[in-house]
């Protein structure tokens, strides 16, 4: 069942990505010969409105084949106003960007649905209080629930950290303890901490950690829009930073996961709850959007760079340069896929 869920989720994400390219291409009048979910041998197809819609044997991606575009034939020229190569560079950039944008849009829609259905977050319940910390000196105890900081209502644990970091000076904490509300004034101190990439950073802290307790927050449609926007931006930034830290060597290559890891994460989420499955689907959709925007030839981001070069230089890159860079892009992508599979197998073997 987990494998089926994985294939359905992946196919859905690929379809949405390619649909973005397809709709933008058709908007500019570009003919689309093929809309494919998967690569390799065709296992099912149907002709509709001049496009062959198909499922292929290898379900690890997809593509739209437009008139006048072929990475294996960079010098391809197909005449007519319905040809991709006859569109202006800006129009081609819009067509290329539409795929990743569709992934960001899908993630926002999924986060919106999650917000309406109930988003799970860590409860603002205190688990541990560090020795000699500002919280301990103020009399904070394990099991206390933080309900307000100054005039900011607190519903989740994340809000506590964000409020402390974005503030200055002493803060007034309102704590629920044994059914009563108690006010405590705490002056956070600057201390060493680790971010999600295990880097040591300086951070305003009061010396508390969360209890392993979840709270479900239900949003109205207006606040759900804000939640969806914030989660999509937050996820995008996290993935962009992750790629940057990987290139810098801060994140080890052993952290790179492949299709096996993705499949396991999706399978585990599907067994947990529909909300968990929607959340991981949204995160993977953002991941696809971000990765496809990387300036690697053979990806949308690489093709966008080619078109930006054409705008700046007033000419297209030579066919030879285009082909060499595209092959280099394929080598990079293949290497990353093999690295992910290698890491997956290592994890399975312990």
Image: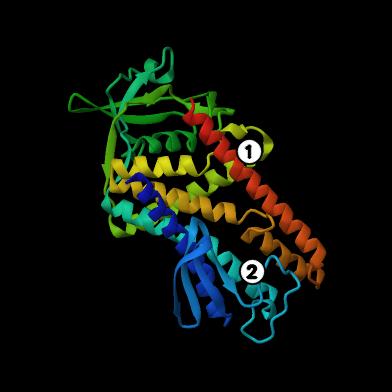
- Furthest toward the top, the residue is 131
For the question of whether residue 196 can be seen, the reply is no
User: Quick one: label 1 or label 2, which is nearer the N terminus?
Assistant: 2
How many numbered marks are there? 2
The image shows residue 303, relative to residue 240, as above or below, that is below
Residue at horizontal 48 percent and vertical 68 percent from the top = 19
Q: Position of 69 compared to 350: left or right?
A: right
Residue 184 image position (x, y, % from top left): 33, 25
Instruction: Say which of 312 and 106 sits in front.
Output: 106
Q: Position of residue 248 (x, y in %)?
A: 68, 37
> What is the secondary structure assignment of the residue under circle 2?
helix
Q: 58 or 107: nearer the eye?
A: 58
Residue drawn at x 31%, y 27% is 212
**236 is higher (above) or lower (below) than 127:** below
Residue 199 lies, with reference to residue 97, above or below; the image says above
Residue 287's x, y, as percent? 51, 50
Q: Nearer the viewer, residue 225 or 2?
A: 2
Q: What's the colour scheme?
A: rainbow
Q: Is residue 224 visible?
A: yes
Task: Report the residue at 51% width, 70% height from top.
Answer: 35
Residue 224 at x, y percent in the picture: 34, 55
SS type, badge 1: helix
Q: Which residue is mark 1?
A: 246
Quarter of the image holding residue 8?
bottom left
The residue that label 2 is drawn on is 93
């Amino acid at each position: 069942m987990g494998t089926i869920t994985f294939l359905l989720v992946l196919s859905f994400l690929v379809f949405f990505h390619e649909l973005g390219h397809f709709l933008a291409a058709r908007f500019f009048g570009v003919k689309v010969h093929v809309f494919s979910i998967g690569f390799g041998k065709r296992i099912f197809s149907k002709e509709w409105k001049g496009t062959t819609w198909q499922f292929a044997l290898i379900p690890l991606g997809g593509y739209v084949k437009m008139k006048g575009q072929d990475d294996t034939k960079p010098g391809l020229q197909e005449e007519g106003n319905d040809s991709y190569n006859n569109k202006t560079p800006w129009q081609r950039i819009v067509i290329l960007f539409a795929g990743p944008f569709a992934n960001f849009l899908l993630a926002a829609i999924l986060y919106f649905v999650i917000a309406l259905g109930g988003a799970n977050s860590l409860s603002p319940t205190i688990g541990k209080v560090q020795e000699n910390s500002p919280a301990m000196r103020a009399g904070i105890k394990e099991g206390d629930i933080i309900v307000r900081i100054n005039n900011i209502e607190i519903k989740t644990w994340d809000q506590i950290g964000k409020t402390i970091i974005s503030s200055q000076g002493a803060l007034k904490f309102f704590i629920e303890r044994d059914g009563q509300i108690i006010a405590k004034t705490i002056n956070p101190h600057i201390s060493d901490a680790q971010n999600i990439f295990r880097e040591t950073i300086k951070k305003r802290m009061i010396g508390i950690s969360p209890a392993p307790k979840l709270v479900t927050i239900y949003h109205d449609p207006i606040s759900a829009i804000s939640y969806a926007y914030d989660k999509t931006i937050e996820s995008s930034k996290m993935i962009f930073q992750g790629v940057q830290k990987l290139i810098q060597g801060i994140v080890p290559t052993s952290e790179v996961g492949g299709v096996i890891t993705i499949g396991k994460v999706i399978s585990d989420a599907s067994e947990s709850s529909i909300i968990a499955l929607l959340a991981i689907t949204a995160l993977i959709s953002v991941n696809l959007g971000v990765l496809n925007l990387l300036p690697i030839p053979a990806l949308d981001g690489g093709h966008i760079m080619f078109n930006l070069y054409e705008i700046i230089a007033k000419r297209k890159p030579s066919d030879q340069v285009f082909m060499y860079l595209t092959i280099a892009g394929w080598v990079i992508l293949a290497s990353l896929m093999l690295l992910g599979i290698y890491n997956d197998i290592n994890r399975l073997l312990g």
